[in-house]
Structures are given as structure tokens and as C-alpha cells.
Image: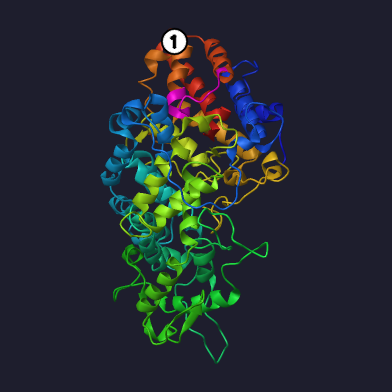
């Protein structure tokens, strides 16, 4: 990765604010801090954070071992609660911090497991009249429906896990081709994943495999059996990605997520013949139009159904197992998914990625092993219980132990959407007219460089094994997935976008800073509060001193001036390396 200097990045950021020439001004300082965060994490020229702070080293294979118990209920501090919420929610708030302190970590999770949301995306689209035929070939409304849930739904844990799962089992709205009604197809996929995210992973594989959105995205909707006259073979796209990305991965794994070796070499999980065999299962599936037409989006909400004449009924062999001949499409699918789910890779493969999405980029093998053991058996003999897995991830001592805050090899880069959502959740951003017109935020130069269900490929916005080239992360043989979408342009775009969002809102979406207004005349008090809620109190003394100096340089004493100080303080904290790197 080409590494910009702090001055170059600062100049780029302040292009949006040409009137600011004083290098002690908060906006200039924000630019420098952001550049430092990027350079430091890439192994560049800043000593604010080492590159290794994003990652964990690997070790020899380990069996699952009991983790020390998390902190007792009475001992949870505000800082500990805020740190927990940074991992477990879409973003902390004063109210949620107090709730964690009152209920304890496990109690908060239990409450969240049963907490209702704010309706689903599909019904919101219908309520806005977007199921009219006028919108059949349009994406209109999808971004609004997605952002409304991420920002406003009270079931914050459910939204975080839904986001994590859709970054593992990827569908992107741009690839939903063939049936029209893109907004509804994408909304149905998110609603399906949200409804299933606290259930069983095997059930998710079942629902995904009959999802109209997935059928479109990975091109097996309308797939037909082998044609001996033309030699045409079934489409293999979904069969390949189901194994490679959604369930077992490319290499055989130990329980702790490290590769299994034979004669010192990695062992591949499947071959081309396995893909070909499995692809036979995914023939005959198509939209369920229920005897009607595609002039309403309703079929996008129904699982796909079998067209028996297109389904391959001969035996299908893959992963050293065989689905027998003569089965109907639904029975063959069930048998195939049972074979895949029984593979020993599923637990460590999925568990490690969920840890990466929530806690740390490079979990130590013992952490992976403990979570994978729960995935394999939740204590009742059930495999794939996601509630148990989520608890195992978030309550493990590796996640909760505060000593890891100073561990230079622990943590992860916050992906841009989560940075934005941390601000929106902390300060109760809402859309008074219920339009939520944030739009597509994919442009890295002017927006976030990431947007819900808009991954550029089935490999997500970033790969779990991505290594920034020519960095100390690479030298240490570690990974930093989110750095795949991090570059000079995205860093500048993020700060400029957040600066505008903080001070002017995003279209009809505005934040509420009433809780900060009484603190704004006192820079230390203002920054301490923002540091707690957004950064879990992890801004260094040096950073806080710099930020206080910047905010104190601004006038105070009136509500207008106080508001300007709040805007500056929020932008500064959200540009600080200790916020950008989640510890």
C-alpha cells in the first residue's frame, strides 16, 4: 500500500475547508491524526500505534480449553461497558452503557436476544409505495430501508450479527439480475438473515440455498441438469462458493483454525470434482411465482421452488459422500447440506470469521478453539447454535480482558460503516420524515467507501485473510482485513464525509447533541464524554491533550459557539487512531 504523509493527507482533507489555514485548527489536526492512524497501522511513519496493534500471532494447534470467567456484574465500569458495546453492538450510547452495567454482559446479551426490532425492510418499502410497477427495475428505497434498521432499530446486537453474517454469506444488490425488484430482493435477503441470525447456522445455509437473492447473485436460479445433446453442464458458481466462502473454506483446519498438515503441506478441502458433484444438487431451482406473474415483488420473499424436469436426479458425489439417485430436489438439497454441515471445518471456519467481525483480526488459536467447541456442541448436543456462539465470542476472556487494550497485537480496524454508525447510535440520529435518505455510501473519495449489501464481489468488501503489502503486518505474517478498503482516498473521504455528517447531518438524518451542549464550554469534560462513548476511553493522554488544545482554541460562551466546539470535538475523536482501531 502506498503510504501518504500526514501533511499530504491533511492537505487533501482541508481542500473541503480552504478558509482554514491555521495548523492548530481542529479540522487540520483531525486530518493529521487520521493520516497518522493510517500510516501507523500500515507500518508507516508514526509512533501513535504500531501496525501489530491490529493483529494476533498464530501458534501451534490447540484443543479447546476453558476460558477464565468474565468480570463480575458489580465490577463493570463505564469504560468496560463501552468497550463491550463496541464489539457487540452497532454503537454505544450513554443509555446502553448503563444497561450493560445494570444487567452484566451475559444479561445484556440475553435481553438483546429477545428484543424486538423496528419492523422489517420489506414492509417499510411497501409502506412507501415502492411495490408499484413503476419501481420494478429500480433500486429505489433499498439504501434507506437498510440504513433505517442499522441506525434506528433497538435490537442493536441483532443488527451487528446480521451485518457480520452478510459479510460472510455475501449477496450484493448490484448482482441481483434476472427478476427485477432489486430493492425488494435485497431487503428480503437482509430480513431473512436478521430473522435467522440467533438461530442455527445449518438453518441459515438452508434458507440461503433457496433464497431468490442468492439464486440471482450466484447464478443458480434457473440452473438445469446436464444436457447430453449439447454437453452443457450445470452452473457451478454457488456450489463452489458455498464450500469455499460459506462453510468449510479452502484448507482443512484444526479446531483452533490453524491449517491441518500432511507431510508438512496444507490439505485442500475439495477438488474440482467435488464442485461438479455438488453443482448437480443446485439444478431445477427457480422463482416461486405462485401461478402469477412478476408484476409484484411478492415472489422475492418466497423461497425458490423446484422445477422437477430441470433437476438432476442421478447420484451426486462430493466431499467423500454421496447423495443417492432418485431424490427430489428438496430432499437432495437437505442431504447435501447435511454433508457439508457435518464437515469438521465448519466450526473453526465460521467461528474465526465471526471473531474477526466482532473482536479482533487475528484471534489466538486457543480463542478460536474455545468458540469452535461451542459451535460444535452448545452444551445440549446441538451444533451451530449461534446464540451460544455469540456468547462464547463476546464473553470469552480474550474479548473481555482489559489487558488486551495495551496488547500491541490485539484488535481490528473499524470498518467505515461501523465508524459512521457509532456516531449515529451515540447521538440518536433519526429521520424526522422517515425517509432515511443517506443513500449509497460506496464512493471512497466522497463518502464511506462501503455501504450495506453493496460489496463489490462475493468475497465481501475485504477478505478475512487480506495482508496489506509492504507493511509490518505482512512482515509479522498477520492479517488486517479492513485494510483492503483503506487507502489515501478513502481516509480523506471518510473524514470529510463525517465532518459534514456531524455538522449538517446527512440529508434528512440528523443527530441530537443535547447531551453534549452542557459540557461544551469545558473542552476536557466534552472530550472525556465523547471519548467514553465513541472510543471506550481509549484515546491516549497525548491525543487528548492535542484535542483539548484544539477545542480550547475555539470561542465559547454561546450555544452557537458551543455547537461548533461539539462538531470539532466529534470530528477529532472520530479521526483519532485510537477510535479507528478497535481494541
Number of labels in the image equals 1
Q: Nearer the viewer, residue 525 or 22?
A: 525
Q: How far across and how far down the image is residue 459, in percent?
A: 56, 57
Extreme-bottom residue of the structure? 229
Q: Nearer the viewer, residue 568 or 400?
A: 400
| Residue at point 64%, 30% (across, down) | 35
Question: Is 579 a magenta residue?
Answer: no
Residue 265, image x, y percentages: 67, 63
Q: Nearer the viewer, residue 381 or 513?
A: 381
Q: Secondary structure at mark 1?
A: loop
Q: Position of residue 215 (x, y in %)?
A: 44, 68
- Asked if residue 56 is positioned above or below residue 346 in the image, the reply reads above
Q: Which residues are magenta?
A: 531-541
- Compared with 50, 196 (above or below) is below
Q: Is residue 160 left or right of residue 290?
A: right
Residue 444 picture quarter = top right
> Residue at point 60% right, 33% down?
408
How far across and down, in percent of the image, does residue 68 sit? 42, 38
Residue depicted at 55% across the width and 21% down the height: 540
Residue hosting label 1: 521
What quarter of the picture does the N terminus occupy?
A: top right
* Left or right side of 35 for 385: left
- Asked whether residue 510 appears in the rendered view, the answer is no
Amino acid at each position: 500500500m502506498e503510504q501518504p504523509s500526514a501533511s499530504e493527507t491533511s492537505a487533501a482533507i482541508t481542500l473541503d475547508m480552504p478558509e482554514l489555514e491555521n495548523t492548530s485548527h481542529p479540522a487540520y489536526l483531525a486530518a493529521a491524526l487520521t493520516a497518522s492512524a493510517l500510516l501507523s497501522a500500515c507500518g508507516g511513519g508514526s509512533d501513535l500505534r504500531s501496525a501489530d496493534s491490529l493483529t494476533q500471532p498464530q501458534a501451534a494447534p490447540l484443543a479447546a480449553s476453558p476460558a477464565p470467567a468474565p468480570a463480575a456484574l458489580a465490577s463493570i465500569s463505564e469504560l468496560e461497558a463501552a468497550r463491550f458495546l463496541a464489539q457487540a453492538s452497532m454503537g454505544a450510547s450513554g443509555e446502553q452503557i448503563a444497561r450493560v452495567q445494570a444487567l452484566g454482559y451475559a444479561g445484556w446479551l440475553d435481553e438483546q436476544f429477545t428484543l424486538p426490532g423496528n419492523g422489517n425492510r420489506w414492509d417499510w418499502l411497501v409502506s412507501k409505495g415502492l411495490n408499484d410497477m413503476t419501481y420494478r427495475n429500480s433500486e429505489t428505497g433499498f439504501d434507506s430501508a437498510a440504513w433505517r434498521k442499522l441506525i434506528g432499530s433497538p435490537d442493536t446486537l441483532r443488527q451487528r450479527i446480521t451485518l457480520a453474517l452478510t459479510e460472510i454469506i455475501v449477496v450484493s444488490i448490484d448482482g441481483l439480475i434476472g427478476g427485477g425488484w432489486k430493492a425488494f430482493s435485497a431487503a428480503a435477503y437482509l430480513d431473512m438473515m436478521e430473522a435467522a441470525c440467533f438461530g442455527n447456522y445449518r438453518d441459515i445455509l438452508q434458507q440461503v440455498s433457496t433464497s431468490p437473492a442468492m439464486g440471482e447473485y450466484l447464478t443458480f436460479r434457473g440452473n438445469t441438469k446436464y444436457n447430453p445433446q449439447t454437453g452443457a453442464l450445470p452452473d457451478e458458481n454457488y456450489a463452489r462458493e458455498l464450500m469455499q466462502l460459506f462453510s468449510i473454506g479452502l484448507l482443512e483446519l484444526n479446531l483452533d483454525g490453524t491449517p491441518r498438515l500432511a507431510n508438512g503441506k496444507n490439505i485442500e478441502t475439495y477438488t474440482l470434482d467435488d464442485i461438479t458433484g455438488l453443482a448437480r444438487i443446485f439444478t431445477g431451482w427457480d422463482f416461486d411465482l405462485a401461478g402469477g406473474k412478476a408484476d409484484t415483488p411478492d415472489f422475492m420473499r418466497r423461497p425458490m421452488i423446484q422445477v422437477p424436469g430441470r433437476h438432476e436426479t442421478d447420484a451426486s458425489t462430493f466431499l467423500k459422500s454421496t447423495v443417492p439417485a432418485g431424490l427430489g430436489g428438496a430432499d437432495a438439497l437437505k442431504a447435501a447440506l447435511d454433508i457439508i454441515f457435518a464437515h469438521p471445518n465448519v466450526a473453526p471456519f465460521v467461528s474465526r470469521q465471526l471473531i474477526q467481525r466482532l473482536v479482533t483480526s487475528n484471534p489466538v488459536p486457543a480463542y478460536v478453539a474455545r468458540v469452535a467447541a461451542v459451535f460444535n456442541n452448545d452444551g445440549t448436543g446441538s451444533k451451530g447454535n449461534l446464540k451460544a456462539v455469540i456468547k462464547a465470542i463476546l464473553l470469552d476472556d480474550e474479548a473481555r480482558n482489559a489487558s488486551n487494550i495495551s496488547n500491541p497485537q490485539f484488535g481490528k480496524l473499524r470498518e467505515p460503516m461501523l465508524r459512521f454508525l457509532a456516531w449515529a447510535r451515540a447521538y440518536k440520529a433519526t429521520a424526522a420524515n422517515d425517509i432515511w435518505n443517506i443513500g449509497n455510501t460506496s464512493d471512497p473519495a466522497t463518502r464511506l467507501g462501503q455501504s450495506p449489501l453493496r460489496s463489490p464481489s462475493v468475497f465481501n468488501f475485504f477478505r478475512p485473510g487480506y495482508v496489506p503489502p509492504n507493511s509490518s503486518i505482512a512482515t509479522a505474517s498477520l492479517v488486517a482485513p479492513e485494510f483492503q478498503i483503506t487507502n489515501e482516498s478513502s481516509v480523506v473521504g471518510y473524514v470529510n464525509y463525517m465532518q459534514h455528517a456531524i455538522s449538517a447531518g446527512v440529508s434528512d438524518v440528523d443527530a441530537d447533541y443535547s447531551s453534549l451542549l452542557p459540557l461544551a464550554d469545558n473542552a476536557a469534560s466534552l472530550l472525556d464524554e465523547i471519548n467514553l462513548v465513541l472510543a471506550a476511553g481509549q484515546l491516549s493522554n497525548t491525543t487528548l491533550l492535542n484535542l483539548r488544545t484544539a477545542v480550547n482554541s475555539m470561542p465559547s460562551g454561546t450555544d452557537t459557539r458551543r455547537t461548533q466546539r461539539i462538531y470539532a470535538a466529534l470530528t477529532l475523536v472520530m479521526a483519532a487512531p485510537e477510535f479507528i482501531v478497535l481494541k
